[in-house]
């Protein structure tokens, strides 16, 4: 076997063919895997399988390799990423809507830790800190806004705030307030409801009375004076906070906490009261907390739940049963401080430990590992950011770090949606191509081999599908299936629609190629050698057709990716909330979105482009690798 | 030749019949009830019942599907395309204006497309492997991979919003009558959609022209021409280009027919009242007759284009015998 002459290999006999030419798989094998491994260098050169030649040619093509690497990256990003980062399709967080890409929400300045933290308060994408020296720091990301006239940048601290000694700061959702030692209040950030402004009424009161606390709500602010009077301003109409605080409560308030629709108040006799929308679950204060039988000493409120601490050290809570916010974990120790983020609660115990529970959408419950064993003296939870100050003055931060690709109009993380959208888009594209290639092969091969009336009939069918316009029919077909089927089935149907509309071109190519190959000399030679008809088809004709098919699969994949994106963009493809790269752009048709929220259309668009480009590069390189004549071109 | 034409025409008959049946079935499968759609929903129950039945009768929906199909075919052949429920007027008049807008847009796209692709394609083929060629190869591959909405949104973001040179979308309005400024404003509104459509269409055509030219340059008669000592200019423009024009003519015929086709995505983004945009609106609003008519129209258009392209091919190139 060692010294088998080359000729014997190149001109195979019928018995040789019988051995290997039986199945489709052996054909594939012959295309890509060399059968004998024991040839000398000279023999090997003479006997390179077509598959090897193609691969070698392909890897000589620089752009092709770039495309291949790019495509593998996109695949890994979408398919491995979607395993690592699961998506909750029903989760929306409108407070976080339209925030630009960044990852710095928790990057507090080192100076703040050096000067010692007096207070930290957080908005949706930023935090404001007050040092023991009375200096104010703001870090994080500018929450985006359309109404530029009504807002000032949140990260740019006003000059007066920098110049004066500040005693208290607070952050609302998208604005911040600071109070100086002389009792002057400064506001900046989004001011669409004048929540970051000091009114004349307020200024007069501030001049007369001392401030106990400032509250920052969704789009309103409130101030609690030391004499127990509460005053709210900003967006107070929808939550009925514009009504003045009832006579019997006003002047007796010891502490007040803000939730979007209510303000919960702790009165001087240890009972709890509320103003705002009375029907909210958060306003359903248990009876025993209102009649004075239990004396409450501290309260805190998340978005939809309240936590209260009585003088015996027991905790009481009420509100909406959501995100496990009412499930207080077991702990040993006395509670010395409590604070609440939007969907999570944090407790500080007398032994310096921190207890936390609630929602974990942004890692609000993932405390930094190096915090273990440190004695914590202060905790600050607000929105989705949490900070803990240790005895030695070091700051620990956990919670929402930011959004790499920003958020959409419903506050959903675009990074996660791009990953999962990629999985959907790449799958829809791939399956639709597989469908169309199978159809094309069946029709093209039957037509090419049988000829006659079969060919005629099949070609008329191909003409029909060739003549129907792609986009209009895809839209119409998609509208036919809308509403009749579930969301998941709709995705399958989109695959089928794209597949059914995509096959005629390739079917014609396959047929034409078969007709051309059939007339070639090597087929004649095989016939003269007495090779069976079936073997001629499988071993001599089909391999030459397959090259064409493989190139067309890759190029067709790119174009069906683009078709899916276009269909979904128009709202006729994959339906939200399931993300696809196309439907993520659906909301990006108004010029304000294009202008201010550029990340919402640019990033998904770039991903479609990048994926299609890398696939096209691979396809182009494959075509050149397979067609030896192409190198001459 | 005549025999071939007759044969082609006969073979088209089953194709047209199947297409029409498919489109009819597709329209019938669209969700919603056209009769209900056209009634005043404020009617009382009994009144509604009567009006509904009357409307069904008027629209011919009370008959069986085959009868409806033949009626529809008959009407269509007579130039009656039905009633558009979206625009509340006959389909024919409803699509006239958008069709005109699309054609105006497409004229500019085609002119720009041909003006760029033919010289660039030829130059790429002649200077094969040069920097110029590689640049256009990569460029055409890149634009070929670009979703049209991405091109459109990027253009709006840069040119309409950040530079504020052109409107982001919409149609010109004749506020002060159809004066010179009005016609000038057409240009203003058209530039961005035209650029978008040109960029999207460019890639395929450049490659096609380049390959046609390369094929021509590889022919034996080019070698003969060169060996005769003809100047390179004569070889390229007189021998190669004239022959490359044969496949290019196919593209030319296709572009002429593509004048009438709309571009759903681009027109929607730029709020251009073209036929593609109208089609998207019609599908969303369940305007059956308009959708059906337009789909049929586009199908017939592409069948005709195909036929004309084939025939011209045989006409221009004497080497091809049409049988």
Image (cartoon, rainbow, N blue to C red):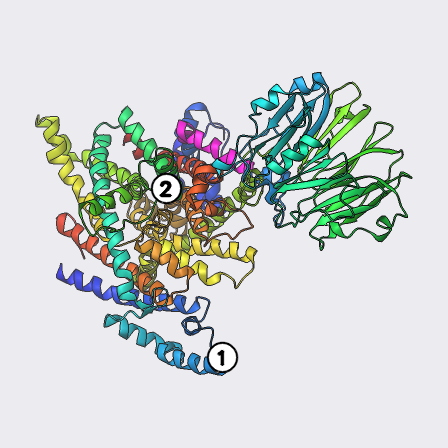
Question: Considering the numbered disc 2 on the image, is that residue within a helix, a strand or a loop?
Answer: helix
Residue A328 percent across, percent down from the top left? 82, 42
Mark 1, other Cα within 10 Å: few <14 / some 14–19 / many ≥20: few
The first of marks 2 and 1 along the sequence is 1
User: What is the chain letter for disc 1?
Assistant: B
Residue A411 percent across, percent down from the top left? 58, 42
Instruction: Say whether residue B214 is magenta.
Output: no
The stretch of residues the image draws in magenta is: A56-77
User: What is the chain letter for disc 2?
Assistant: B
**Residue A384, label in figure:** none
Question: Considering the numbered disc 1 on the image, is that residue within a helix, a strand or a loop?
Answer: loop
The kind of secondary structure the magenta stretch mainly shows is helix
Task: Examine the rendered structure and indicate whether residue A452 appears above or below residue A579.
Answer: below
Q: Which residue is mark 2?
A: B152
Task: Examine the rendered structure and indicate whether residue A101 appears above or below residue B305.
Answer: above
Task: Examine the rendered structure and indicate whether residue B11 appears above or below residue A76.
Answer: below
Question: What residue is rendered at 49% in x and 33% in y?
Answer: A36
Tag 2 and tag 1, C-beta contact below 8 Å: no
Q: Is residue A543 visible?
A: no
Q: Which residue is mark 1?
A: B44
Task: Examine the rendered structure and indicate whether residue B269 appears above or below residue B118.
Answer: below
């Amino acid at each position: 076997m060692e010294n088998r002459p080359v000729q014997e290999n190149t001109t195979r006999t019928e018995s040789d063919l019988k051995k290997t030419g039986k199945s489709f798989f052996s054909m594939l094998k012959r295309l890509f895997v060399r059968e004998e491994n024991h040839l000398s260098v000279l023999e090997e050169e003479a006997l390179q399988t077509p598959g090897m030649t193609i691969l070698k040619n392909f890897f000589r093509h620089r752009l092709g390799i770039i495309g291949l690497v790019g495509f593998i990256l996109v695949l890994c990003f979408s398919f491995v990423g979607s395993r690592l980062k699961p998506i909750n399709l029903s989760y929306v967080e409108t407070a976080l809507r339209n925030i630009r890409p960044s990852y710095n929400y928790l990057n507090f300045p080192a100076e703040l830790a050096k000067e010692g933290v007096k207070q930290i308060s957080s908005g949706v994408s930023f935090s404001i800190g007050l040092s023991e020296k009375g200096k104010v720091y703001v870090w994080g990301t500018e929450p985006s806004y359309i109404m530029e006239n009504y807002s000032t940048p949140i990260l740019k601290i006003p000059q007066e705030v920098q110049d004066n000694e500040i005693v208290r700061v607070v952050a609302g959702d998208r604005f911040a307030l600071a109070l100086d030692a002389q009792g002057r209040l400064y506001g900046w950030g989004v001011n669409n409801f004048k929540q970051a402004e000091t009114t004349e009424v307020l200024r007069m009161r501030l001049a007369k009375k001392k401030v106990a606390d400032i509250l920052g709500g969704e789009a309103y602010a409130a101030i609690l004076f030391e004499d127990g009077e509460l005053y709210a301003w900003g967006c107070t109409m929808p939550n009925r906070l514009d009504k003045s605080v009832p006579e019997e409560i006003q002047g007796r308030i010891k502490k007040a906490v803000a939730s979007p629709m209510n303000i919960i108040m702790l009165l001087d006799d240890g009972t709890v009261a509320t103003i705002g929308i009375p029907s909210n679950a958060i306003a359903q204060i248990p009876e025993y907390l209102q009649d004075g039988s239990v004396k409450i000493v501290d309260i805190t409120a998340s978005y939809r739940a309240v936590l209260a601490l009585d003088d015996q050290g027991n905790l009481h809570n009420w509100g909406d049963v959501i995100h496990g916010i009412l499930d207080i974990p077991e702990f040993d120790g006395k509670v010395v401080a409590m604070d609440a983020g939007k969907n999570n609660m944090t407790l500080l115990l007398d032994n310096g430990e921190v207890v936390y529970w609630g929602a974990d959408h942004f890692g609000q419950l993932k405390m930094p590992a190096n915090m273990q064993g440190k004695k914590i003296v202060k905790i600050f939870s607000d929105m989705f950011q949490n900070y803990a100050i240790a005895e030695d003055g070091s700051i620990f931060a956990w919670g929402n770090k930011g959004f790499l690709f920003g958020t959409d109009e419903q506050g959903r993380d675009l990074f996660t949606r791009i990953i999962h959208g990629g999985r959907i888009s790449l799958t829809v594209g791939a399956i639709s191509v597989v469908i169309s290639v199978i159809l094309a092969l069946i029709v093209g091969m039957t037509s090419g081999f049988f000829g006659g009336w079969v060919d005629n009939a099949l070609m008329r069918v191909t003409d029909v599908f060739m003549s129907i316009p792609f986009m209009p029919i895809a839209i119409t077909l998609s509208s036919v299936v809308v509403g009749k089927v579930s969301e998941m089935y709709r995705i399958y149907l989109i695959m089928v629609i794209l597949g059914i509309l995509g096959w005629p071109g390739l079917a014609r190519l396959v047929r034409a190629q078969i007709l051309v190959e059939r007339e070639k000399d090597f087929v004649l030679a095989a016939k003269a050698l007495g090779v069976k008809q079936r073997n001629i088809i499988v071993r001599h004709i089909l391999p030459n057709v397959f090259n064409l098919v493989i190139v067309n699969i890759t190029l067709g994949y790119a174009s069906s990716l683009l078709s899916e994106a276009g269909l979904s963009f128009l709202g006729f493809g994959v339906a939200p909330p399931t993300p696809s790269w196309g439907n993520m752009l659906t909301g990006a048709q108004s010029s304000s979105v294009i202008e201010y929220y550029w990340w919402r259309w640019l990033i998904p668009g770039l991903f479609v482009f990048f994926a299609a480009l890398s696939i096209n590069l691979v396809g182009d390189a494959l075509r050149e690798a397979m067609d030896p004549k192409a190198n001459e071109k | 030749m005549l025999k071939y034409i007759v044969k082609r025409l006969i073979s088209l008959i089953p194709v047209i019949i199947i297409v029409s049946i498919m489109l009819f079935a597709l329209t019938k499968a669209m969700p919603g009830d056209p009769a209900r759609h056209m009634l005043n929903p404020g009617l009382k129950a009994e009144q509604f019942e009567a009006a509904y039945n009357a409307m069904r009768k008027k629209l011919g929906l009370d008959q069986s599907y085959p009868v409806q199909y033949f009626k529809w075919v008959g009407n269509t052949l007579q130039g009656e395309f039905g009633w558009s429920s979206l625009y509340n007027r006959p389909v024919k008049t409803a699509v006239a204006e958008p069709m005109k807008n699309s054609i105006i847009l497409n004229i500019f796209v085609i002119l720009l497309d041909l003006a760029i692709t033919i010289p660039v394609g030829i130059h790429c083929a002649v200077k094969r492997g040069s920097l110029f060629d590689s640049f256009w190869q990569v460029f055409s591959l890149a634009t070929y991979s670009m979703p049209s909405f991405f091109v459109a949104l990027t253009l709006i973001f840069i040119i309409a919003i950040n530079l504020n040179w052109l409107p982001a979308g919409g149609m010109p309005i004749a506020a002060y009558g159809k004066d010179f400024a009005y016609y000038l404003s057409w240009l203003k509104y058209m530039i961005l959609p035209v650029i978008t459509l040109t960029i999207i269409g460019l890639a395929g055509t450049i490659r096609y022209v380049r390959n046609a030219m390369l094929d021509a340059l590889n022919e034996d008669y080019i070698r003969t021409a060169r060996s005769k000592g003809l100047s390179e200019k004569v070889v390229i423009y007189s021998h190669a280009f004239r022959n490359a024009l044969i496949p290019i003519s196919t593209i030319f015929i296709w572009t002429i027919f593509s004048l009438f086709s709309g571009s759903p995505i681009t027109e929607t983004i730029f709020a251009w009242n073209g036929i593609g945009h109208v089609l998207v609106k019609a599908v969303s609003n369940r305007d059956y007759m308009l959708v059906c008519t337009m789909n049929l129209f586009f199908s017939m258009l592409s069948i005709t284009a195909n036929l004309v392209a084939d025939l011209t091919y045989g006409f221009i190139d004497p080497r091809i015998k049409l049988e």
